[in-house]
Image: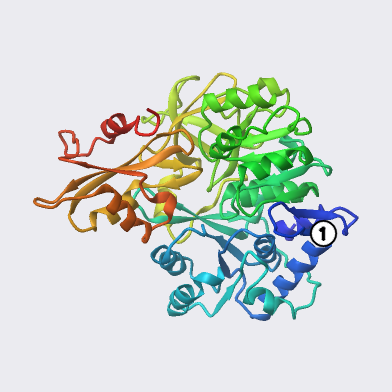
Amino acid sequence: MSDQNLFAALRAAFPDDLDSIAIDCGDSPQPLAYTWRDLDRGTAMLANLLASLDLPPASRVLMHVDKSVEALMLYLAILRAGHVVVPLNIAYQAAEIEYFIGDAEPAVVVCAPRNFGWTSRIAFQAGTKHVYTLGDDRSGTLLDRAAFQPDVHETVARAASDLAAIVYTSGTTGRSKGAMLSHGNLLSNARVLHEAWAWQRDDVLIHALPIFHVHGLFVASHGALLAGARMIWFSRFDARAVVERLPEATVFMGVPTLYVRMLAEPALDRERCAGMRLFVSGSAPLLVDTFRAWRNRTGHVILERYGMSETVMLTSNPYRPEDARRAGTVGPALPGVGLRARGEDGELVPPGEIGGIEVRGPNVFSGYWRLPEKTAEEFSADGWFKTGDVGRVDADGWVTIVGRNKDLVITGGFNVYPAEVEALIDDLPGVVESAVVGVPHPDFGEAVVAAVVAQPGATLDGEALIAALKDRIAHFKVPKRVFVVAELPRNTMGKVQKNLLRQTFQRSFTG
């Protein structure tokens, strides 16, 4: 079957009543709602605009925009037109965008209006011919141009193996890699989660996540769309506003940080959550204290799951019975997903012992964009993807992640690889070397901190270094604290002992 376009499957799930509400904007200054017909027409007009450009088949379309319903429509339109979406974090700065455009070589770039000047300059110099703007207030040249297009479009046929998205995920060397996800990868995972989490047409999802990564763009959006379920849409997370809308909703997905912030709201109680059936947490480890506090406060048990950019979702705590969900675990593998733990010797480890997590299944990506050697390194000889995470798999198949690629820091659900930050710190005046680690943080799960050694005769100020970095990289990558030290701890081989730095600074934010 050649027509496996993900959009076609999502469109087929739209309810018969296309004039019913699909998306209700929860933080719009004025009441604003979109019907299913609006989604159909809007994506058709945007897809027709892309078609009018006579792009090569499966061209990349890079999105560096604020969250909006129109941005979601653009994503769907790219799929509908048979092209490949490249979603990027809106926090990325010029040097980062220059790398992504150079690597992905997009035919089209869509950016926030405020960034058009520098983005268009980078894009045109790299050979991109089409640059549009899209604001979070329904402004921009993209919508201006699309307004003249027909509102009917025949979805372009795509095979399950055809590329649908390139999701960039950092590497330990600091170089971002583009994970290539196919229509089949995304659709198979959406269908598995539809069953696993018992999505229904009468569900209402509070969508308060960003839509530039897997959790918000694929897991949350696909879940609601494939069920034909309504969304309450927040362009930015606001704990008080989200808690206020909980009585209207049935499903909420968030990173641990969002749960911590909602727990700080006095209005959060059992009555407000009475109609909710599912709270999902992912993208970073959920602290056991947060798990317990949420259950005590709301009467609901958070469902923790595990996934990554290269694979979408891999495991999930059970939907039912709710009290079977376990704090500190991510549950067993989802249907169709193979999961195993192997030791450094390549042998499977016994149940309950720690090993490197490896996976396979229809949701697992085909490889990294234009990095065949790196792709080959990340797969075992028998075709399993090495996640880089370390964990235990018990006799019942339940997975507990105990660590990950030791350098990775996950702060507020965002991945930060220290090598990239260290390279920038080391280039600052007066710095001889640095080491970046993650330490526990009550709000973000982990916080980025840096230990810095000054050049002889130089005087360094941690706050000044932080300020200098804020103009160079996304703010979530900037260390929250910079400690000036006499030297970095090293082993006999000269390698920096980051475990000692973590121990030294582990109470920086937790007392």
Task: In the rendered view, tell whether residue 179 sits above or below residue 59.
Answer: above
Task: In the rendered view, tell whether residue 123 sits above or below residue 217.
Answer: below
Residue type highlighted by circle 1 = Thr
The coloring applied to the image is rainbow
**Quick one: quadrant of the N terminus?**
bottom right
Residue lying furthest front: 266
Closest to the observer, 175 or 133: 133
Image coords of residue 181 (percent x, y): 58, 54
Closest to the observer, 146 or 394: 146
Q: Secondary structure at mark 1?
A: strand
Task: In the rendered view, tell whether residue 270 sits above or below residue 57.
Answer: above
How dense is the environment of label 1, judged by Cα within 10 Å: few (below 14), some, or many (20 and up)? Answer: some
Image coords of residue 20 (percent x, y): 87, 55
Image coords of residue 253 (percent x, y): 65, 40
Q: Can residue 170 be spotted in the picture?
A: no
Closest to the observer, 394 or 272: 272
Image coords of residue 404 (percent x, y): 42, 36
Q: Can residue 399 be spotted in the picture?
A: yes
Side of 203 where 169 appears, left or right: left
State the residue position of label 1: 35
**Quick one: quadrant of the C terminus?**
top left
Residue lying furthest right: 17
Report which quarter residue 304 is drawn in.
top right
Q: How many marks?
A: 1
At horizontal 33% and vertical 55% (from top left) the residue drawn is 467
